[in-house]
Image (cartoon, grey):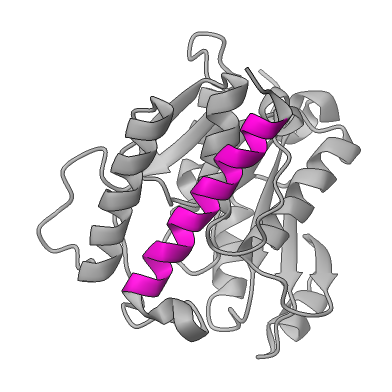
Amino acid sequence: MPRHDELPLSSRYLTALPVFNEARHVAGVLDEVLRFTSDVLVVDDGSTDGTSEVLAARSDVRVIRHEINRGYGAALITAFTETLTGGWAGLVTIDCDGQHQPQLIPAFIQAAGSPEQEADIISGSRYLETPPRSASVPFDRRRINETVTGELNQRLGLRLTDAFCGFKAYTRRALESLHITEQGYAMPLELWVQAAAAGLRVKELPVPLIYLDEARSFGGALDDATTRLDYYRCVIDQAEAAVAAKDPE
């Protein structure tokens, strides 16, 4: 059987990492990612902490840089566009903060590319299996995740256990069906609304529950849990309204 990097481009998955100010983690994460795939894109979303210099010194990954910080969703929109214009079979997304395990990349690619799975989006879940008791989850993050995941399931008829995990694999069909505009942290919520409307098939894969920086900031007002939850609900409402406007009954 040929290695992944020996397959034609149309049969291979690009792996993309959205990065913003990850100078502490980026080199080590990329070294580990490259053990499992050679097709790597880094979207540097306007980093100012030395991340850009670390990336500039590497020749083993492709880097696209946003000159200013545009947001987590904007970085993923860039990755989606590069995948579609580049002729890839699909896309794996993995965060660069050390909370995801790159050794799972082949499993995500296999699940997305397997006819038996019949899935268009493979989404990581930190709660699909019972997390270890030692796992430390910031209370407000777990509460908001549970609340938003439950509301999405009720509103969209999904069966998610983790609405926010950034570890995902998308088939080309899925990417062609999505037209994401949300540039911030709530991008996954617009994604789920559009995925449900398009009838995309979703499967979750368990991933470890790891928090390396419990005090990590969302930035500005979003560090307030109530404000963040209101923002998430607003994005869901807007996404549903946009879908309804495109396809009125």
Estimate the x, y position of residue 171 in percent, counting from the top left: 66, 27
Asked if residue 106 shows in the view, the reply is no
Q: Looking at the picture, does residue 201 appear above or below residue 121?
A: above
In front of the other: 221 or 20: 221
Magenta highlight on residue 156: no
Estimate the x, y position of residue 205 in percent, counting from the top left: 38, 34
- On the rendered structure, is 140 left or right of 61? left
| Residue visible at 25% across and 60% down in the picture | 142
| Residue visible at 66% across and 28% down in the picture | 174
In front of the other: 1 or 131: 131
- On the rendered structure, is 164 left or right of 40? left
Q: Looking at the picture, does residue 20 appear above or below residue 36?
A: below
Dominant SS in magenta: helix
Task: Give the magenta-colored segment's residue range.
Answer: 226-245
| Residue visible at 69% across and 35% down in the picture | 178
Estimate the x, y position of residue 164 in percent, counting from the top left: 43, 51
